[in-house]
Amino acid sequence: MATRVPGPLTRPAAAATGPVATADGLTRRFGERTVLDRLDLEIGRGEFIALLGRSGSGKSTLLRALAGLDSEAEGGLSVTGSVAVAFQEPRLVPWKRVHANITLGLAVPDPKEKADAALAEVGLTERAGAWPLTLSGGEAQRASLARALVREPDLLLLDEPFSALDALTRITIHQLVLQLWSVHRPAVLLVTHDVDEALLLADRVLVLDRGRIAHESDVPAPRPRHRDHPDLTSLRTTL
Ligand code: ADP
Ligand code: MG
């Protein structure tokens, strides 16, 4: 990949060391049903993890807990630093233009400049003034990534963000995610149903089953990454 000049979104190297998130016996019950069952998990800084598991195995429940969106999870959970989430459906506010969606609720001194930089990074500068409903699936997902990125998260939670995209758009967004990850280095926890996608993107693959991390494997290097693809920019702007 071409060397990138750090833009305004680049944060200094994290001063803190140690894991960005630790679940220690995390448990979540819905009535009689125990969805997360004393789950243990450690997410290191800058790590790219893929989380696989059957539908209903509790992947989204785990992400909600990590995002601080679930006050009823029990057990140990510690998250240091900021967290951002991108969902399968981009969840843009339809009556606000793309740029306003990025700055929505953004508490920094220069939200406009931050949003401009994030939109440039995902290749959406020309669509900044567009209404969300006029975006293609790939554009909406890129806007969703920009909205997450602009928060400079230490932990980026991606809940099946690519599964509704067509195959070609998905490849482009994969490359974009790898590029954003290699520049900003948040820890990423990506939920996916796609084993190939998990192996392509992640350093470590986890499988959630019966409320626990049932399998775990490091992805051996060299991985089949597209990170170094020379045509990244042109590919990105075609979709
Ligand atoms: P996954 O993302 O792996 O498909 P989820 O985390 O969405 O699975 O759901 C895991 C289980 O928890 C499912 O059986 C689901 O029905 C249940 N569940 C999730 N959220 C709620 C809720 N708010 N109330 C009751 N049950 C829920
Ligand atoms: Mg889910």
Image: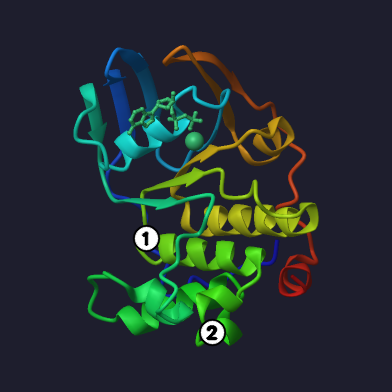
Quadrant of res 43: top left
Circle 1 SS class: loop
What SS does tag 2 mark?
Answer: loop
Is residue 20 visible from the viewing direction of this image?
no
- Which image quadrant is residue 24 in? top left
Identify whether 152 is placed above or below 208.
below
Q: Residue at x 68, y 56 (%)?
A: 175
Residue 22 against residue 179 in the figure, above or below? above
Look at the image and tell me whether residue 101 can be seen. Answer: yes
Q: Is 221 placed above or below 184 here?
A: above
In the picture of the structure, the residue carrying the numbered disc 2 is: 130
Residue 2: numbered disc? none
| Residue in view at x 58 percent, y 70 percent | 122
- Bin the neighbour count of mark 2 within 10 Å (Cα to Cα): few under 14, some 14-19, many 20 and up: some
Q: Is residue 162 left or right of residue 84?
A: right
**Mark 1 residue's CB less than 8 Å from ligand 2:** no
Q: Residue furthest front?
A: 31
Bin the neighbour count of mark 1 within 10 Å (Cα to Cα): few under 14, some 14-19, many 20 and up: many
Q: Position of residue 209 (x, y in %)?
A: 51, 15
The location of residue 139, given as percent across then percent down, is 62, 69
Query: The N terminus is located in which quarter?
Result: bottom right
Which amino acid does the dot numbered 1 rest on? Glu
The residue to which callout 1 is attached is 152
